[in-house]
Amino acid sequence: MANYWYFHLPNFILAALMYTMLGRFLLGLMVDADSPNYIWRFFCRLTDPVIAVLSIVTPKVTAPAVLWLFGFVWLFWLRVVFHYTLLLLNLAPRFGGAAS
């Protein structure tokens, strides 16, 4: 497992960002944008850099909640492309019983 750190570490970071973005969307349905809730502030702090990059290519009239969902989808596809690229380069981990 440790031999594939170059796969697992980026995949874990992207997954954590992706699900934090989804959590931000769901929590945003229940709390105000300026809420002092520490979980909300953590989600915002962690996902704001992704939102900043995403807002460059997204129309300015897009609602913040829609932007968060776009972020979730973009991060999902980034994980898929990353995994597929490593599979093509024969660098991704394989199932234990699979033939090489």
Image (tube, rainbow, N blue to C red):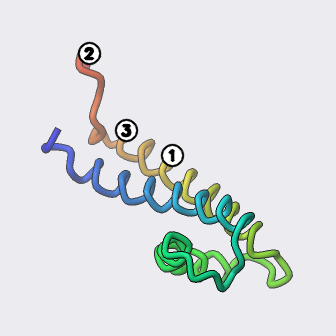
Q: Is residue 44 left or right of residue 15?
A: right
Secondary structure, mark 2, is loop
**Position in image of residue 50 (x %, y %):** 54, 74
Whole-percent x, y for residue 20 in the image: 52, 61
Sequence order check: which comes first, mark 3 or mark 1?
A: 1
Rendered location of residue 98, percent (x, y): 29, 16
Left or right side of 52 for 2: left
**On-image quarter of the N terminus:** top left
Of circles 3 and 1, which is in front? 1
Q: Quadrant of residue 51?
A: bottom right
Q: CA distance from mark 2 to mark 1?
A: 22 Å
From the viewer's perspective, is residue 89 above or below residue 41?
above
Disc 1 residue type (three-letter): Val
| Mark carried by residue 99 | 2
Q: Looking at the image, which residue is at 66% across and 83% down?
A: 56
Q: At 69% across and 61% down in the image, what residue appears?
A: 69
Q: Is 87 left or right of 38, judged from the image as shown?
A: left
Outermost front residue:
36
Q: Residue 80 — which label?
A: 1
- At x 56% / y 51%, what residue is drawn? 76
Helix, strand or loop status at disc 3: helix
Q: Residue at x 48, y 62 (%)?
A: 17
The amino acid on which the numbered mark 2 sits, given as a three-letter code, is Ala
Give the spatial CA distance, label 2 vs label 3.
Answer: 14 Å
Front residue of 78 and 16: 16
Question: Around disc 2, counting alpha carbons within 10 Å, would you say few (fewer than 14), some (14 to 19), or many (20 or more)?
Answer: few
Q: Secondary structure at mark 1?
A: helix
Tell me if mark 1 has few (under 14), some (14-19) or many (20+) residues whose alpha carbon lies within 10 angstroms of its own. few
**Amino acid type of disc 3?**
Leu
Q: Is residue 54 above or below residue 98?
A: below
Specify the label residue 87 is tagged with.
3
